[in-house]
Amino acid sequence: MNCYETLFVVKPTLTDEETAAQVAKVTAVLAKEGAELLATDDMGMRKLAYPVQKNERGYYTILFFKAEGSVINELERNLKINEDVIKFLTVKYSNTREIAQFDKLVAAANKNSEPEAEAKTEVEVEAVTESVEA
Amino acid sequence: MAERRKFKKRYCKYCEAKVDFIDYKDLAQLKFSLSERFKIMPRRLTGNCKKHQELVTVAIKRARQTALIPYIVDRKNVVESPFENVR
């Protein structure tokens, strides 16, 4: 299992529900392929630095997940087919330094989305480190 | 030792901040290594060390791919406030 991060941009012309449906569609592909979704980070509607398919803005979503390499093929195939997705980028975190950073990013993403859950996990993390020290 | 150094000695800002990974989504961190036309600044001007320059380069290229920062800025392709998303 490798650590991956996928960023994709959904067209700005869709309504909120349609955008949410597109995000759900991508996460469904991951679930079907047996990937372990760790966190999602909604960057929301942003202005693009340059027009993409004549769109000036886009809805950014980032998914952090652990999966086998073959999952990426299937995921990217689906993103390419989907006409509402205008940009996507998958980054692999391979060496130990990058994986440490990956964990940090996942923690940050979870903190932003649900602050209460993060407080709980922090306690758990502390408990784990204590047990390691002991 | 008669010759005095004419310029301030440059140092790597990323080394000083003890950065060991540069995220392509963190535009505030990339901004330092970009010129006003969004070119990647050379090491001889920024003072970045080799290690961090390589990290920055990859991060900037990824940010360009995902339309977070522009590839080029010229008279035809003017960005009014490119860092308006950066808070």
Image (cartoon, coloured by chain):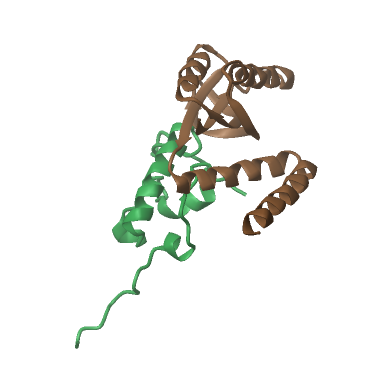
Residue extending farthest bottom = B2
Q: Where is residue A17? Give x, y as percent.
A: 74, 19
Q: Nearer the viewer, residue A2 or A43?
A: A2
Q: Where is residue B7? Give x, y as percent.
A: 31, 74
Chain A on-screen colour: brown
Q: Where is residue A105? Give x, y as percent.
A: 59, 44
Query: Relative to B47, is A108 above or below?
Result: above
Residue A102 visible? The answer is yes
Q: Residue B73 vs residue A56: left or right?
A: left
- Find residue A10 and report its image quarter: top right
- Find residue A15 and report its image quarter: top right
Residue B81 visible? The answer is no
Query: Relative to A88, is B84 above or below?
Result: below
Residue drawn at the location 54% of the way across and 13% of the way down: A83
Residue drawn at the location 34% of the way across and 73% of the way down: B9
Q: Where is residue A129? Give x, y as percent.
A: 65, 54
Could you tell me which quadrant the N terminus of chain B lies in? bottom left
Q: Residue B74 vs residue A133: left or right?
A: left
Q: Nearer the viewer, residue A134 or A108?
A: A134
Residue drawn at the location 61% of the way across and 34% of the way down: A46
Q: Which chain is green?
A: B
Residue drawn at the location 69% of the way across and 49% of the way down: A125
Q: Residue B66 vs residue A109: left or right?
A: left
Q: Nearer the viewer, residue A61 or B42?
A: A61
Residue extending farthest front = A134
